[in-house]
């Protein structure tokens, strides 16, 4: 791969400096330090404006090592869930990484010149990237890590959220995260509030919805976060805000979607390659796994071609689709078998199961025994409605995934 690097190009061009792209860059820099890498990010810094969280059990030893040097919040007292008919504390350790810390780490550890920010990639090809200003970056391999784009080939619903960090006037008293507080009013779909105690006097509050449309009403969600904080006696100053609209994939024609997205010889990774948890929209465990796979491929074959890498990651996407069919089935039941105000019952019943089953579920590693257990017993939704939901297709995920509006 020295040719591209030797002509003011690079060995590997990564388009998109979010979680997937940034982790691939870190893994390559660690495992293959002689490779010349460029990360092309449209924003002012890599990472965007996000918070990524995961359970310690989501990652294997290699994945844990990759993330070990990053500054992140960690909780060792487990986490809580709360539902209208009861709650529970589970003992699994929890982690959370903010995009600012992610960006700072990338900037500090990647070689100078690796990060190319404030530049939009206009076109990607097997042999390089063309920028919006016409400049071209030759590359031996190109990995497109830009996010999910709405499509008619995949079906499902949406996870819509707004999160805020508050610097409080007094300590909040929380000792562990609240992953799901579904005791809140069930409106606009399955709704829960997610709470992270970031410090003794700082808290992150996220209002989340599993809903049928991708509409994010900023003013409405803002008011609900304010009301939740007030109900808990938390007053202070907002220091951070983020919003998101993520696909909850319940089915579709994955091969047709891959064909729609494919650029010959260009590899794809991250949410734009379908490497997400279909039901929870989690990306971090799969982004870590992909980064390690890419680094291993280059370590074993330094002259790996972009076409070979594209084939490798496309195959990984197909395997991931096959492995996660169970979660898409559950998504169809969640959206189609219960009225929006009753969807919480699906998660309420799920969280009564064994902790080890819950851990495997979030990591996307549910066993056949796990699947039987999740589907057995008294169903949380009417059986007839569940059967009808499985027989029907959800709407295509082609509506504007960033639709937002302000309330009057």
Image (cartoon, grey):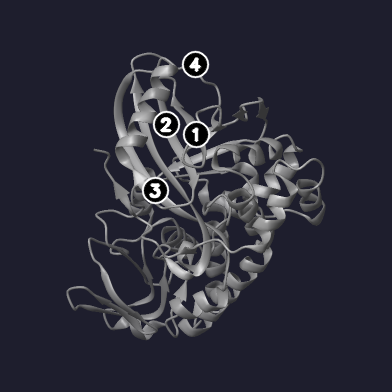
Secondary structure beneath label 1: strand
Disc 3 and disc 1: Cα gap in Å?
Answer: 14 Å
Relative image position of residue 357 (x, y in whole percent): 74, 44
Q: Residues within 10 Å of mark 1 (few under 14, many from 20)?
A: many
Q: Which residue does the numbered mark 1 point to in the structure image? A: 194
- Determine which residue is flagged by label 3: 244
| Quarter location, residue 12 | bottom left
Q: Are marks 1 and 4 in contact (CB under 8 Å)?
A: no
- According to the picture, the residue beneath numbered tag 2 turns out to be 204
Indicate the position of residue 95 as horizontal and vertical percent values: 53, 39
Viewer-nearest of discs 3 and 2: 3
SS assignment at label 3: strand
Q: Residue at x 39, y 18 (%)?
A: 230
Q: Position of residue 397 (x, y in %)?
A: 46, 63
Mark 4: few/some/many CA within 10 Å (<14, 14-19, 20+): few
Earlier along the polypeptide chain: callout 1 or callout 4?
4
Is tag 4's residue or tag 3's residue first in the polypeptide sequence? 4
Whole-angstrom CA distance, mark 1 to mark 2, is 8 Å
Residue placed under numbered mark 4 in the picture: 173
């Amino acid at each position: 791969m020295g040719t591209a690097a030797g002509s003011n190009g690079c060995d590997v061009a990564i388009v998109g400096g979010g979680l997937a792209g940034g982790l691939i860059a870190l893994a390559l820099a660690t495992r293959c330090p002689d490779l010349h890498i460029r990360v092309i990010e449209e924003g002012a810094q890599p990472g965007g404006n996000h918070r990524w969280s995961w359970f310690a059990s989501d990652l294997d030893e290699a994945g844990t090592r990759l993330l070990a040097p990053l500054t992140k919040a960690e909780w060792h007292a487990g986490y809580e869930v709360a539902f209208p008919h009861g709650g529970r504390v589970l003992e699994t350790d929890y982690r959370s990484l903010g995009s600012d810390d992610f960006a700072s780490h990338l900037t500090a550890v990647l070689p100078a010149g690796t990060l190319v920010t404030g530049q939009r990639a206009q076109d990607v090809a097997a042999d390089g990237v063309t920028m919006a200003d016409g400049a071209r970056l030759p590359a031996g391999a190109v990995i497109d890590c830009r996010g999910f784009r709405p499509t008619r080939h995949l079906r499902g619903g949406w996870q819509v959220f707004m999160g805020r960090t508050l610097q409080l006037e007094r300590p909040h008293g929380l000792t562990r995260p609240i992953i799901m507080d579904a005791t809140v009013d069930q409106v606009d779909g399955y709704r829960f509030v997610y709470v992270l105690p970031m410090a003794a006097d700082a808290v992150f509050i996220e209002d989340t919805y599993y809903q049928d449309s991708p509409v994010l009403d900023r003013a409405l969600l803002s008011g609900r976060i304010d009301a939740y904080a007030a109900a808990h006696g938390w007053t202070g100053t907002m220091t951070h805000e983020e919003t998101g609209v993520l696909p909850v994939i319940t089915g579709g024609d994955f091969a047709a979607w891959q064909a729609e997205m494919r650029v010959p010889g260009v590899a794809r990774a991250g949410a734009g390659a379908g490497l997400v948890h279909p039901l929870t929209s989690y990306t971090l465990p799969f982004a870590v796994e992909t980064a390690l796979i890419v680094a291993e491929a280059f370590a074993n074959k330094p002259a790996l071609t972009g076409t070979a890498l594209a084939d490798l990651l496309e195959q990984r996407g197909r395997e991931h689709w096959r492995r996660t069919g169970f979660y898409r089935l559950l998504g169809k039941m969640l959206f189609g078998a219960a009225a929006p105000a009753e969807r919480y019952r699906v998660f309420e019943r799920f969280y009564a199961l064994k902790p080890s089953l819950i851990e495997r579920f979030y990591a996307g590693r549910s066993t056949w025994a796990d699947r039987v257990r999740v589907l057995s017993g008294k169903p949380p939704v009417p059986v007839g409605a569940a059967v009808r939901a499985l027989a029907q297709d959800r709407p295509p995920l082609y509506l504007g995934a960033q639709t937002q509006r302000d309330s009057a």
